[in-house]
Image (cartoon, rainbow, N blue to C red):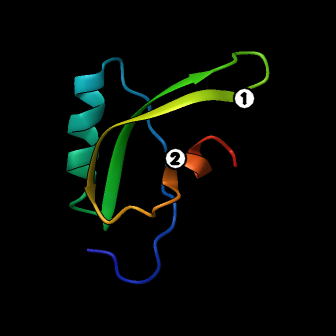
Amino acid sequence: MKRGPLAPGKADQSPSENGAIKRAEAETTRAKGAVAFRVAADDETGEVSEATILKQFGEIPDDFIDQARGG
């Protein structure tokens, strides 16, 4: 398992919420924590209008959702 400060990893897309949750859970074998979340974003600008955590595993920063929204 990784040691050191928490840092964002690679974001993966999943075709379903259940698939995203399974991927996040599997990621915890390589990272301190992982989050499965649903994002609503503008296709043209990439601006995130909504980010909802579906499930989280392990250590996740308190301000994760703000960071996901670009804040």
Direction right: furthest residue: 45
Q: Amino acid at mark 2?
A: Ile
For residue 65, the mark is 2
Front-most of 27 and 66? 66
Q: What residue appears at the point 21 percent right and 47 percent down from the top-left corner?
A: 25
Front-most of 60 and 3? 60
As displayed, is residue 49 above or below residue 27?
above
Q: Where in the figure is residue 13, as x and y percent of width and height?
A: 44, 29
Q: What residue appears at the point 32 percent right and 66 percent down from the top-left corner?
A: 59
The residue singled out by tag 1 in the image is 47
Quadrant in which residue 42 is drawn: top right
Q: What residue appears at the point 28 percent right and 63 percent down from the top-left corner?
A: 30
Q: What residue appears at the point 35 percent right and 17 percent down from the top-left corner?
A: 15
Q: Where in the figure is residue 41, as x and y percent of width and height?
A: 63, 22
Question: Quick check: marks 2 and 1 in contact, CB under 8 Å?
Answer: no
Q: Where in the figure is residue 55, as x and y percent of width and height?
A: 27, 41
- Along the polypeptide, which appears first: circle 2 or circle 1? 1
**What count of labels does the image hold?**
2
Left or right: 21, with 47 as reference point: left
As displayed, is residue 50 above or below residue 31?
above
For the residues marked 2 and 1, what is the alpha-carbon distance in whole angstroms? 14 Å
Left or right: 51, with 69 as reference point: left
